[in-house]
Image (tube, rainbow, N blue to C red):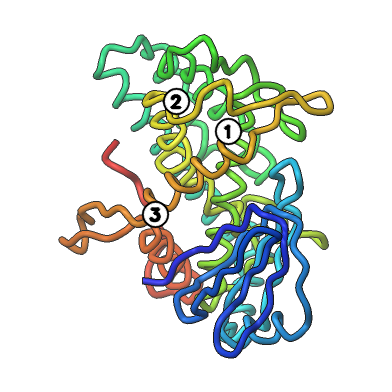
Amino acid sequence: MKKTIYIFNDGEIKRKDNTLYFETDMNKRYIPIEDISDILVFGEVSLNKSLLTYISQKGILMHFFNYYGYYTGTYYPREYLNSGYMILMQAEHYLDVNKRMAIASKFVEGSSKNMLNVIRYYKNRGRSLEKIENAIISLYEEIHHCKTTNQLMGIEGNMRDMYYKAFDEIIDNNDFTFEKRTRQPPKNELNALISFGNSLLYVLILSEIYRTHIDPRIGYLHTTNFRRFTLNLDVAEVFKPIIIDRIIFTLIGKKMITKDDFEPDIGGILLKDKGSKTFVQEFDKKLSSTIKHRQLGRNVSYRRLIRMELYKLEKHLIGEAKYEPYVSRW
């Protein structure tokens, strides 16, 4: 199985014969190109056109994050699976209001069901979450009354605000309190973990989209615009509760990440390199772990589950089968 390479150190990455070669002040490392699916760069890294040409030939995406761990952009190689027909189908489903709403509402539906399953898992283990569960259910019932994607985004935002109120009860650690959702910069440790984890998920889904016939620039819940990819943001809504949030609960619950893994920086809180490395290790572990898929009757990894979600979307767009979002058992 191909793997994701995470680069936290400063240095130079280049092509060396048929491998990638990463050199820092301290050491040198050869990375077989055939083993790589994508590269995430957190350190200050220099590279050249020869490297970019080589990874393009191999279909490897390179994602960049700044000093604060915020996603800044992607080197996205020339599409080799995109089809004109699929792009036309994506555009048709975006421009037709009813077709767009049908897809967008499914993303919100999947997101809310997965949030509810997380809530119910901890409620069944003695956490006092019934009020939050009922509030999310009430909001869920409003999804199919929405007439616009802005209304859907409002419902999804309200559900997520209610869902985040459960974090303090679930985590039960005074070093990690939610307070409210803050971004760029996150104002506390828990928000820093959420932002970092969500960024990892966005780029993972972007990489998986690249390996399908779908164009990532045409989203449905998030408005397609001139500036960014949007379809990966849509799909991420379904998987945030069952991948990123569960990872956060594990990292804090097992004290794999503590308050010492953060530091104040320019009006916010910054996750240090040690904490970031711990997070990506758990993220990789989660993606390679498997679950029993009810329809297939066999185990699949979480990474494969995301690819399958994209295939379901493809089938919806070409009229083979209506898209139904993945919903976890907890």
Of the image marks 1 and 3, the number of the one nearer the N terminus: 1
Numbered tag placed on residue 284 in the rendering: none
Numbered tag placed on residue 193 in the rendering: 1
Numbered tag placed on residue 252 in the rendering: 2
In the depicted view, which residue is nearer to us: 80 or 319?
Answer: 80
Identify the residue shown where x is 59% and y is 83%: 82
Q: Position of residue 270 (x, y in %)?
A: 70, 31
Question: How far separated are the C-alphas under marks 3 and 2?
Answer: 19 Å
Quadrant the N terminus occupies = bottom left
Question: How far separated are the C-alphas under marks 1 and 3?
Answer: 17 Å
In the depicted view, which residue is nearer to us: 321 or 271?
Answer: 271
Q: Position of residue 218 (x, y in %)?
A: 66, 65
Residue 118 located left or right of residue 193: left
Circle 3 residue: 287
Of the image marks 3 and 2, the number of the one nearer the N terminus: 2
Q: Dot 2, crowdedness within 10 Å: few (<14), some or many (≥20)?
A: some
Question: How far separated are the C-alphas under marks 2 and 1?
Answer: 10 Å
Q: Position of residue 57 (x, y in %)?
A: 61, 88
Q: Relative to residue 125, is residue 46 depicted above or below?
A: below
In the depicted view, which residue is nearer to us: 167 or 89?
Answer: 167
Could you tell me the amino acid type at mark 3? Leu
- Numbered disc in front, either 3 or 2: 2
Instruction: Check disc 2 and report its element: helix, strand or loop.
Output: helix
Residue contact at pointers 1 and 3, CB within 8 angstroms: no
Residue contact at pointers 2 and 1, CB within 8 angstroms: yes
Residue found at the far front of this picture: 26
Image quarter for residue 169? top left
Could you tell me the amino acid type at mark 1? Leu
